[in-house]
Amino acid sequence: MPTPRIQLRGLTRRLPSGNRLLTIVDRIDLSIVAGEFVAVLGPSGSGKSTLLALMAGLDRPSEGEVLLDGRPIQDLSEDDLALVRRRMIGFVFQSFQLLSNLTARENVLLPLELAGTAGAGDRADSLLAAVGLGERGHHYPSQLSGGEQQRVALARAFGPRPPILLADEPTGNLDRATGQIVLDTLEGLRRDSGTTLVLVTHDADVAKLADRRIHLRDGRIEREDTRVGEPVA
Amino acid sequence: MTSGLALRMMAREVRGASGKIAFFVSCLAVGVAAVVAVSGLSNGIEAGLRHEARQLLAADLSVRAEKAMTERVTQLVRELVASRPGAGTTLVRELATVVSVPGASGSPGPSALVLLKAVGPEYPFYGAVTTEPASPLTLLLDDDGVLVAPELAEKLRLTVGSTLKIGGEGFVVRGRIVSEPDKMSAPLALGPRVMLSLGGFARTGLEAFGSRIERTVLIKLGPADGAAEANAAAQKLRGALPEAAGVRVQTYTDAQPGLRDGLKWASRFLGLVALVSLILGGIGVSQTVRAWLASRFDGIAVLKCLGVRPREVVLLYTVETALLGLAGSCAGAAIATGLLAVAPGLLAGLLPAIPIAAWQPGAVLRGIGLGTGVALLFSVAPLSALRRVPPLRVLRRDAEPLSPGWLARGGVALALVSGIFAAAWLQSGSVKVAALFAAGMVASAALLAGAARLLTRGMARIARERVRVTVRHGLAAVARPGAGTLPAVTALGLGVLVVVAIGLVDRGLTSRLRADLPKNAPNIFLVDMQSDQWPQVRTILERGGASEIRSVPIVNARLTSIDGVPAAELAKRGPDEGRRKWILTREQNLTYLDTLPEDNVVVEGKLWSDPDHAEISIERDFAKDMGASVGSKLVYDVQGVPLELTVTSLRTVDWKSFGINFFLVVEPGVLDRAPQMRVAAARVAAGGEQALQDRLAADVPNVTMLKVREIVEKVAALLTRLGKGIRFVGTFSIVAGIAILAGAVGATASRRGREVALLKTLGVTRWGIVAMFAIEFALTGLVAGTIGTVAGSVLAWGVLTRAMEIDWTWRPVFLTVAPLATVAMSVLAGIAASAGALRRRPIEVLRSE
């Protein structure tokens, strides 16, 4: 059996809230194989975003392990975690998180430059073209619509061909039509690159696109199902 | 991360931050300009002195003495000249005396105190005396001719061909002196210059026993001789002459040692004043960097998500801060270079009349180094916070950087204090001064920060609901989180402290000098008087309406030993300079009196109480410096005759009485027959001084009358001009403080814009909002102004009463105006910085929310 791309073992995250500790993520075990598209669903406060942050090493678990390609990351230093993200993980956020002082092209270029990718400029241009913004590379984020900004964010995330892409409500700030364009772009890029995608959403329609859906409630996995709606054994 | 990528990222980072960058650069530029201007001026004068050194001495070497040169000195100079082919000497005599123009019909003509300079035919060896009309000096200065300074010509209405009486002898004015190579600008000169030949000087008869004449031998070495030969020759002369010979040997490479010493101290003092401005700039930088980085937290979190390591983030922004520091420092250095270009014109009369180059690479490097260092030093705290920006912020906006631990806080504080100490050390050249400066800065900043904290807490707790809405909002604004009250109060308060302290010291010193002389205190002194002239002089004084007339004899003597230990040996035991050395090696003035004047009080021993020994009474501090006490046996050499004196009393003297007083008073009968001069003092009614001087110049021309009021006025005028220079440097501190206040307001522009929009939406008029802001800034200014004024007053009190021994005078107007002016400046700067926010229309802000 191949090593899972992402493996979570007994993952728990507790945060102080007033005088007590609040358990946000509670003993989660999960394996995601390479190339798989997993959607994480759940109501607000169910721990979706925290789970994503723990997978990416943006937050540290109170207990349990996060393994990427079989390598635990929870005890790595901040500098080493940054390197893990640089080499393995791409991000797409609900609020786009483009750097406002960079143009669209420079935003796409940045992770490519960090990774030392040869022909970074050409790749950035081709990615912008792929997301339909080939002519808008010189615009700053404030000069782009929400949908356009999210497509730039997609191009940036896929730039260095990360094995893993983590997306947090990528259509949450967009209207339905624009959200659909973004999802189509995301799915197209993922298929082309074979990237493992973990997408957090509370939108069931968006989740339908995933190979597997993880339903969270109160920090625990309530249930899992597959694309066709079959419960996972 | 490659360096190319880092550079690209830095370039992208500064885009769109022009406002913050401008403020950052301005904060530093003000302080660096002050540092570079002070250091550059000092370096420029130093370089100018060295460049013009030969002209400024008018020779390669000079030998000076206040007494007639001994045969030994003359012999050594003769041997030196004989040993260097092409070498030569010329003599110069200088003294202060009174000259006059002939009177008409029995009444004396007008007179003036002048600085007389008699020169030999070879003078000057280097440089030239420029005259009007232009003509060689040897032609103008025959034994009957004199040259006069323009101001004397104007005062006595002298033209070419006029007669001028010097020592009672008539001379013909041959022209005006436009410039002399070896005369520096002398703001404290007793009078204008009169130049004549040595032959002419001999005619005046002023070189009598005891006259205060500076005698100089100017030596020109051979054509091939340079600095090394001049120094070797000087060393040889110094080695061959005993210290007691009272001869000073100087080469052109020494380049005005007295002036350079003064320059060194002035530049150290002003350098520290300038450093205050730079440190205030540092506070502004810290504030800007903090605000700038806080606005970048989201971007930094994204960078960390994209794989930029925390240490790379810190390095990136540290290099960027350093580069901005460098830019600010370069801007400051450019401003200072511009100032230096106009300084000689603005400070004419205060600076030596030598070319001063505006471009001073040493000063520029010092300023850039200090500026960049201060920028980094004051950015350590905000930069170190970057490591702690959580990448999780991309998902949760409320994820703030973790608080630093006490170790980190302590490390930052230690770095700051060490940095300030190091900068002060560099500026002052003294570890002790640097430690005091750093301690003073830390204490003042802590006091001001404490006051700011009290203000914010006080405003947070005050029962605001009882006051009008405008006042209520203004008070609340001071206390709100992120209001920037603390750095604004600290920076502005420090600026006020510096300016108030300088202002009070300047005023205290000047008014003490200008204060009325004590009742019955003499206001004229007569010197260079032979003993047998006293009856005639006394008659002139009495006829001139003078009162409180007093005269005492003066005998010159040199200390030979104390309690059997030779004075030369005692001198070697102490430091190589200072009053002790001077007392033990130079000739001193002794007088003899039956009873002491009223301003003398015997504090130890008893006056004239030992019938078996010749007695001496010594001023207490003088005795301490020389190492003598009651019972000590002092041996003096009185014009070649040894005289043993026993110390039987120590006295205190009230020098502020302006009376004739001496450190050394001998009992009557001991020195009566020694060669002696007399000095006299008297009080003359205002307006009667000039007539008396004219009469004395006509009847006893060798006697020099010194007017206390005139001398005091000259010193006070000089101090006023110096004060202006110091205040100019100090003003940089206030400018820096104001800039920081404006910066603090600018940093909250977005919050203010939103606030203005909401207030306008709720129906508050623009002027109503201006009033709210004015109250906020007035409170900031009031606290900064009050604390700064109090702390500045304490500092000035310490300097005046402890260091200068001047009585403290309360200056209610100054002490009231200073905080009020701070309030006014604070309100104006604050409102000006809020102009953008005030102009915004509510809809613009509310739409962008």
Image: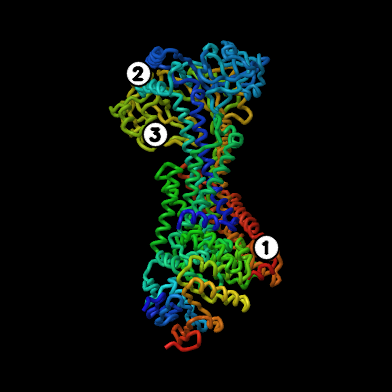
Which residue matches tag 1? B838
Q: Secondary structure at mark 2?
A: strand
Which residue matches tag 3? B622
Comparing labels 1 and 2, the label whose residue is closer to the camera: 1
Q: Earlier in the sequence, mark 2 or mark 3?
A: 3
Comparing labels 3 and 1, the label whose residue is closer to the camera: 1
Residue B837: percent from the left, percent from the top?
A: 65, 63
Q: Secondary structure at mark 3?
A: helix
Callout 2, which amino acid? Answer: Val
Callout 1, which amino acid? Answer: Leu
Above or below, B713 against B408 in this view is above
Q: Is residue B781 visible?
A: no
Of B595 and B432, which appears nearest the observer?
B432
**Quadrant of residue B722 within the rendered picture:** top right
Identify the residue at horizontal 54%, vertical 50% (top origin).
Answer: B28
Which residue matches tag 2? B641
In the picture, which quadrant includes the N terminus of chain B?
Answer: bottom left
CB of mark 3 within 8 Å of CB of mark 1?
no
Identify the residue at horizontal 49%, vertical 56% (top origin).
Answer: B5
For disc 3, the chain is B
Q: Residues within 10 Å of mark 1 (few under 14, many from 20)?
A: many
